Image (spheres, rainbow, N blue to C red):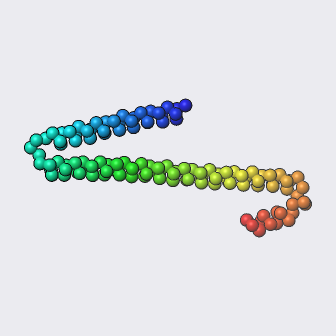
């Protein structure tokens, strides 16, 4: 429930930010168009500068977002590796305990296994 709320909340924030950007560009374009003392070449130069600044900001935000995703991915991989190592350690301990219980139950039956496990260790 919380995740669905956050998604709709983020969508609403993105929508309002998009509207604000469109309004800001509209007002900026209108002010450039209506400025009487500025030649057309200067207006075009300012417009190109504003578009390039916008592209740079979008690229910067995308870079930050990609870095955060990479960090999240790395942390998830490390957590999964640690969980796997713990599971193998605990699983190995469980198997060793079961083996020890079988040996206590009938040591003569597992004599060859004991020799092999000593050689492996």
Residue 81, given in percent of the width and then of the height, sits at 59, 54
Query: Which residue sits at x=75%, y=51%?
Result: 94
Q: Quadrant of residue 100?
A: bottom right
Q: Is residue 96 left or right of residue 78?
A: right
Question: Residue at image x 47%, y 33%?
Answer: 8
Q: Which quadrant is the C terminus positioned in? A: bottom right
> Along the line of sight, which residue is nearer the eye, 76 or 14?
14
In the displayed structure image, the side of residue 35 where residue 87 appears, left or right: right
Which residue appears farthest toward the left when viewing the image? 37
Q: Is residue 32 left or right of residue 89?
A: left
Coordinates of residue 109 in the picture (x, y in percent): 90, 60
Furthest-bottom residue in view?
A: 119
- Identify which residue is drawn at 47% across, 50% down: 69
Question: Which quadrant holds residue 85?
Answer: bottom right
**Quick check: 60 left or right of 50?**
right
Q: Nearer the viewer, residue 10 or 49?
A: 49
Looking at the rendering, in which quadrant would you find the N terminus?
top right
Front position in the image: 85 or 23: 23
* Count of marks overlaid on the render: 0
Asked if 115 appears above or below 27 in the picture, the reply is below
Closest to the observer, 24 or 77: 24
Asked if residue 48 is positioned above or below residue 11 in the image, the reply reads below
Residue 62: give x, y in percent of width and height.
Answer: 39, 50
Q: Position of residue 33 (x, y in %)?
A: 17, 42
Residue at screen point 82% across, 63% down? 114
């Amino acid at each position: 429930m919380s995740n669905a709320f956050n998604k709709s909340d983020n969508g609403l924030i993105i929508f309002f930010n998009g509207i604000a950007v469109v309004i800001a560009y509209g007002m900026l374009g209108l002010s450039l168009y209506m400025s009487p003392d500025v030649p057309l070449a200067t207006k075009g130069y300012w417009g190109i500068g504003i578009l390039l600044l916008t592209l740079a900001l979008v690229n910067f935000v995308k870079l930050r977002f990609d870095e955060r995703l990479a960090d999240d991915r790395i942390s998830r991989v490390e957590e999964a590796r640690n969980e796997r190592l713990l599971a193998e350690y605990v699983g190995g301990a469980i198997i060793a305990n079961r083996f020890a219980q079988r040996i206590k139950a009938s040591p003569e039956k597992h004599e060859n296994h004991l020799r092999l496990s000593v050689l492996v260790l």
